[in-house]
Image (cartoon, rainbow, N blue to C red):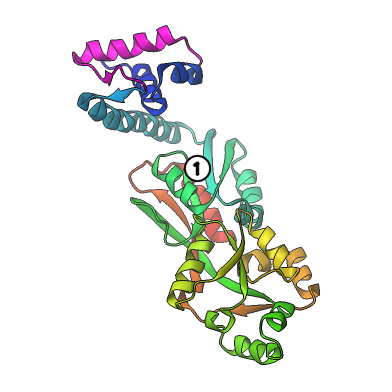
């Protein structure tokens, strides 16, 4: 009979491609880990690894690796479902989202959720859009929150609210780049914010892999522009602060401003910085929750989705 622990230890060796590192990660001896793998090989009567450095899987090992993940996932989902049926008083919910979006959205959801379900342990995993998509795919989070569509297969989505990406333009930068034309350009941007109007300006962008960056790149391609990028960073608040200082143009989600009074006040007081509604349909989207359609949807996750729809 297959032992779950053997499968877990086997997958650790697969992921590390090295017995020493896998044993260290598991907190057991190399000898113990080798014994667990040997038990599996005895069970199936076939070698699972080529004893190379790094370790590589035999064909049988590749098949078992794929199936083992599904077996362990099914075990976890079975325990979750039985626990939900038995008594929805304890549990865990792992939420994936960017740190900036979390700061703006979670205060609207989590206090109400925690008050209603005080014994559910909440875990927040932060990362960019690509990282969160991967975590959802591999079952490392229960749900993710971000702009639709998510770039991952087998995801079920629940729309929450509309979202818009604004163009943040320092007036001083317009005057510097287009001497004597700044006021005319501001009027044109107000009427029809086309990126081609500011194609010669420098841009401040967040790193590739973030949803806002993906949309920005798509809009640049749509306008047939190759922008001058003076800075890339993982932190969208950094590019906003530098735009305030006139260093470049950037893109910023409207929700991040609307949901933060302090940010709104800063915007109003920031001399010479204007926000424009882009005319590209790519700048207008929907914020949503995504969960893996092939995994069991726990009651903790269902209740979070319900509260999010009510509060956002």
Residue 62 vs residue 126, the one in the foreground: 62
Please give the name of the residue rendered at 52% of the width and 41% of the height, measured from the top-left corner: 94
Q: Nearer the viewer, residue 28 or 303?
A: 28
Q: How many marks?
A: 1
Using the rendered image of the protein, determine whether residue 74 is visible from the camera's viewpoint. Answer: yes
Q: Residues within 10 Å of mark 1 (few under 14, many from 20)?
A: many
Taking the image as shown, residue 235 lies to the left or right of residue 45, namely right
Residue 150 within the magenta-colored segment of the rendering:
no
Name above or below for residue 137 compared with residue 119: below
User: Picture quarter containing residue 54?
Assistant: top left
Foreground residue among 78 and 156: 156
- Rendered-image quadrant of the C terminus: bottom right
**Foreground residue, 9 or 82?**
9
Give x and y (percent) for residue 309.
53, 59
Q: Residue at x 66, y 62 (%)?
A: 239
Q: Can residue 273 be seen in the rendering of this structure?
A: no
Q: Position of residue 190 (x, y in %)?
A: 63, 87
Looking at this view, name the residue that lies furthest to the left: 45
Please state, as top left, top right, bottom left or bottom right, where the N terminus lies in the image: top left
* Residue at the image point whose x is 48% and y is 48% from the top: 132
Q: Secondary structure at mark 1?
A: helix
Judge whether residue 28 is colored magenta: yes
Q: Circle 1 sits on which residue?
A: 300
x then y, percent, for residue 117:
59, 41
Q: Position of residue 202 (x, y in %)?
A: 62, 71
Q: Is residue 92 depicted above or below 255 in this figure?
A: above
Residues in magenta, as a range: 27-53
Q: Toward which corner of the image does residue 14 lie, by quadrant?
A: top left
Height in image: 246 above or below 19?
below
């Amino acid at each position: 009979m297959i032992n779950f622990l053997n499968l877990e230890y086997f997958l650790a060796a697969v992921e590390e491609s090295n017995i020493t590192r896998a044993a260290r990660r598991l907190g057991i001896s190399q000898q113990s880990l080798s014994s667990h793998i040997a038990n599996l090989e005895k069970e199936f009567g076939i070698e699972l690894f080529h004893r190379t450095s790094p370790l590589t899987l035999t064909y049988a090992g590749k098949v078992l690796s794929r199936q083992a993940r599904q077996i362990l996932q099914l075990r976890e989902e079975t325990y979750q479902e039985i626990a939900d049926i038995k008594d929805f008083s304890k549990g865990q919910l792992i939420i994936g989202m960017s740190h900036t979006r979390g700061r703006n959205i979670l205060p609207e959801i989590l206090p109400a959720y925690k008050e209603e379900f005080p014994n559910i342990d909440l875990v927040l995993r932060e990362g960019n859009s690509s990282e969160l998509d991967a975590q959802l795919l591999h079952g490392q989070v229960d749900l993710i929150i971000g702009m639709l569509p998510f770039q991952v297969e087998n995801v079920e989505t629940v729309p929450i609210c509309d979202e818009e990406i604004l163009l943040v333009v320092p007036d001083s930068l317009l005057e510097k780049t287009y001497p004597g034309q700044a006021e005319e350009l501001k009027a044109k941007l107000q009427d029809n914010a086309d990126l081609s109007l500011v194609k010669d300006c420098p841009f401040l962008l967040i790193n590739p892999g973030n949803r806002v960056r993906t949309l920005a790149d798509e809009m640049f391609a749509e306008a047939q522009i190759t922008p001058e990028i003076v800075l890339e960073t993982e932190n969208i608040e950094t590019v906003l602060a530098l735009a305030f200082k006139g260093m470049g143009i950037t893109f910023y989600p409207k929700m991040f401003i609307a949901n933060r009074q302090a940010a709104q006040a800063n915007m109003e007081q920031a001399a010479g910085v204007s926000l424009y509604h882009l005319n590209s349909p790519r700048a207008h989207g929907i914020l949503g929750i995504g969960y893996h359609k092939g995994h069991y949807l726990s009651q903790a996750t269902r209740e979070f989705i319900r509260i999010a729809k009510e509060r956002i």
